[in-house]
């Protein structure tokens, strides 16, 4: 944990219930996320963690409950609207354009910020040219920040897994989000790759002031990075508090921490 200035809640999730047929993925889940904090969501497989992120960014529409982001309360939202409001998301499985370069993949993160039309962009004159050059400058800043200058022209499909995950982080960062949803950003990484990713997550939070919601199975990472932790089990919230409080909660120990991984 760092000593950042944590603000008021930027995201409030209230009484969210989500079912698929007879399967209840989330049951009356409520929590908030404060501005500038790193908020972890943990729990065993099938606890509803990814479903919760999908509700926040509009992929899933809950049957019950509301999501309030920056003071705007909504029952339903679509991912495009969420992104335009400042919500960015990474996924468990890498979702990059494997044949495109690192630079071009990160450039796609700027799409929502482009104001010129397709014809202007195709002709690449006037406003479109100025706009693209400005976007490229922002993308180069992200590339510098993530220390991937040496692979900027490399097709993503040729990169090792850890670097691909860093590029995915970069694409989301290029959108300049206020709320960054990270779904198991360190899954499948070795120790060195995890250390690098931890450092970048802390730097994103510290230097850009970005609020982060993090799903992660590595409890060492969760305890080191998080300001607060919410714990889900079978779609229900069973604990919510600071890392040390959660770690010593008997319900959490029974549901998750006592299970060997």
Image: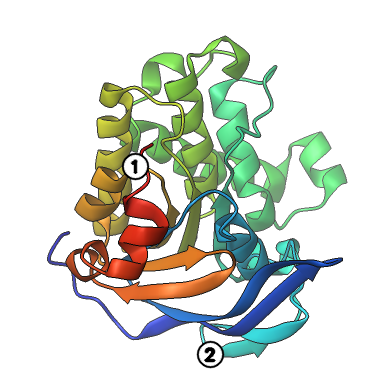
Q: Label 1: how many residues lie within 10 Å, few (<14), some (14-19) or many (20+)?
A: some
Pointer 2 residue: 71
Residue 66 is drawn in which quadrant?
bottom right
State the residue at coordinates (59%, 55%): 50
Image height of 158 relative to 132, above or below? above
Q: Quadrant of the C terminus?
A: top left
Question: Which numbered marker is on residue 113?
Answer: none
Q: Secondary structure at mark 2?
A: loop
Discs 2, 1 touching: Cβ within 8 Å: no
Q: Is residue 109 left or right of residue 224?
A: right
Residue 80 is drawn in which quadrant?
bottom right
Q: Position of residue 5 (x, y in %)?
A: 19, 74
State the residue at coordinates (56%, 36%): 106
The first of marks 2 and 1 along the sequence is 2
The image's colouring method is rainbow
Q: Secondary structure at mark 1?
A: loop
Q: Position of residue 235 (x, y in %)?
A: 59, 68
Image height of 105 relative to 201, above or below? above
State the CA–CA distance, disc 2 to disc 1. 32 Å
Image height of 170 relative to 64, above or below? above
Pointer 1 residue: 218
> 43 or 67: which is nearer to us?
43
State the residue at coordinates (59%, 61%): 53
> 108 or 12: which is nearer to us?
12
Residue lying furthest left in this view?
Answer: 3
State the residue at coordinates (48%, 31%): 165
Q: Position of residue 212 (x, y in %)?
A: 40, 60
Q: Position of residue 93 (x, y in %)?
A: 61, 35
């Amino acid at each position: 944990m760092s000593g950042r200035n944590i603000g008021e809640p930027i995201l409030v999730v209230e009484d969210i219930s989500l079912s698929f047929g007879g399967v209840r993925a989330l049951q009356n889940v409520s929590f908030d996320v404060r501005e500038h904090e790193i908020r972890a969501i943990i729990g065993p497989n099938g606890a509803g963690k990814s479903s919760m992120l999908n509700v926040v960014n509009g992929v899933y529409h809950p049957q019950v409950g509301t999501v309030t982001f920056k003071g705007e309360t909504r029952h339903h939202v679509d991912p495009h609207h969420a992104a335009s409001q400042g919500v960015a998301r990474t996924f468990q499985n890498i979702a990059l354009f494997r044949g495109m370069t690192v630079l071009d993949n990160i450039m796609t993160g700027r799409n929502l910020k482009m104001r010129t039309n397709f014809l202007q962009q195709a002709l690449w004159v006037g406003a479109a040219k100025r706009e693209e050059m400005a976007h490229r400058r922002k993308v180069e800043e992200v590339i510098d920040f993530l220390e991937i200058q040496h692979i900027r022209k490399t097709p993503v499909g040729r990169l090792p897994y850890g670097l691909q995950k860093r590029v995915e982080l970069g694409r989301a960062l290029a959108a300049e989000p206020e709320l960054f949803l990270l779904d198991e950003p360190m899954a499948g990484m070795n120790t060195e790759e995890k250390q690098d990713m931890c450092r970048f997550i802390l730097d994103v939070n510290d230097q850009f002031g970005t609020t982060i919601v993090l799903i992660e199975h590595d409890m060492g990472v969760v305890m080191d990075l998080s300001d607060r932790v919410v714990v889900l089990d079978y779609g229900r919230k069973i604990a919510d508090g600071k890392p040390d409080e959660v770690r010593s909660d008997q319900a959490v120990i029974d549901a998750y921490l006592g299970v060997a991984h």
